[in-house]
Image: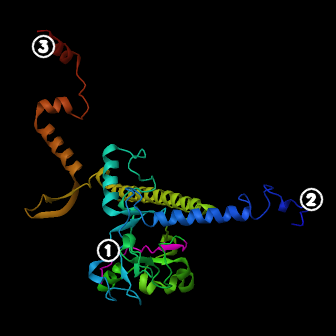
Amino acid sequence: DGGTISSNRTYLRGAGKACHTADHPSNVLKRSKLEDAERARLVLSTCAVSGAVLDLSPAKKNRGGGDGGDGGGGGSVSGADIVACPHGKLYRRERVLEALLRRSQTGGDGGKTGLGSHIRGMKDLHPVRFHMMRSSSSQGGAGGGYVAACPITGSEIASGNVPCFVIVRTKSKDTRTPEDDEVGCNPNVLSERAVKEMGVKGLQAEYGPFEEKDMIRLAPPRAGGVFEEIQRKWETRIEEERISKLKKKKDKKRKRGVDENPKKIHHSSPAPVKRLEVRTSKSSGGGAGPVTKKTAVEEARSAVQSAVAQNPVLSNLFGAGKKKQQSEKEKRDALFTRNC
């Protein structure tokens, strides 16, 4: 066959550099892509808790027509109650509720419920509504002849080869309107291509309001560090929420303390001294004299002094006057009286 040049190792069997060998870098990349596509296909079709196949058939009320669909081709919305976690896995709502209940009863996860620590409760799970279209092939599978597709580009999402995102709407405290209810029933899974072409601002009218950071990547690939980056962002977000909650609690306590301080100061301050109006009579006439103001302390002191002056016993005990100088005879008489 003409032979080979021995110095050129790309033509030697098992050399590890030929493109037809299994350990060539290009083949390793292709193999990882195939594994990621197969893994994504499995994630998009099974429940992460129970392992059961998800029923992606459209709802009965809008099956087979454009009523309730979002575009041509007889598209409709999937009828199953499916939710997604921040890591891009899909769950049946009933199964994940049962798993959360078991975890709360046992007091921990321990890997028995199938839920990771990234799911704290139903607040971390968001509804998923696929845009279902009739499959070109007759093979129905679990969807009964329907496949999940992007409502904008029409690309098949369930194949696992198309990156897709779940649009998580921002919760509003305002009153709900019929338009909000209509948006809440529309498909909310879009392909990455549709998001890039339309832009986040262009999707707000039909799928908003939402923020780009709230979008969930379904079935993220393990290769390229995509899944690790999603994990890191979610952990950072949880930590920020925890710090924000602690800060709000401290501010609330500080505000409550500031509100209570004026009341404490008011209760601890001495009561205001009441001043009494006393009318003094003139010595010349019986008419009322000028009004003089006295405090309660002065009034009490004058009452005590008048009582002491009227009672001789109290006068001897509390008399403020100076004692009279006694003569020698009076002293002897007093001493004799005490001895007797």
Q: Residues within 10 Å of mark 3 (few under 14, many from 20)?
A: few
For the C terminus, the image quarter is top left
Task: Judge whether residue 290 is colored magenta.
Answer: no
Q: What residue is pinned by disc 3?
A: 337
CA separation, marks 1 and 3? Answer: 118 Å
- Quadrant in which the N terminus appears: bottom right
Q: Amino acid at mark 3?
A: Thr
In front: 68, or 11? Answer: 11
Where is mark 1, residue-wise? Answer: 79
Q: Residue 263, located in which quarter of the rendered image?
A: bottom left
Q: Is residue 305 left or right of residue 55?
A: left
In the rendered structure, the answer to whether residue 112 lies left or right of residue 332 reads right
Identify the residue at horizontal 39%, vertical 79% (top origin).
Answer: 132
Count numbered badges in the picture: 3
Q: Which residue is tagged 2?
A: 7
Q: Is residue 183 above or below residue 286?
A: below
Dot 1 crowding, Cα within 10 Å, few <14, some 14–19, many 20+ = some
Q: Earlier in the sequence, mark 1 or mark 2?
A: 2
Mark closer to the chain start, 3 or 2:
2
- Asked if 64 appears above or below 12 in the picture, the reply is below
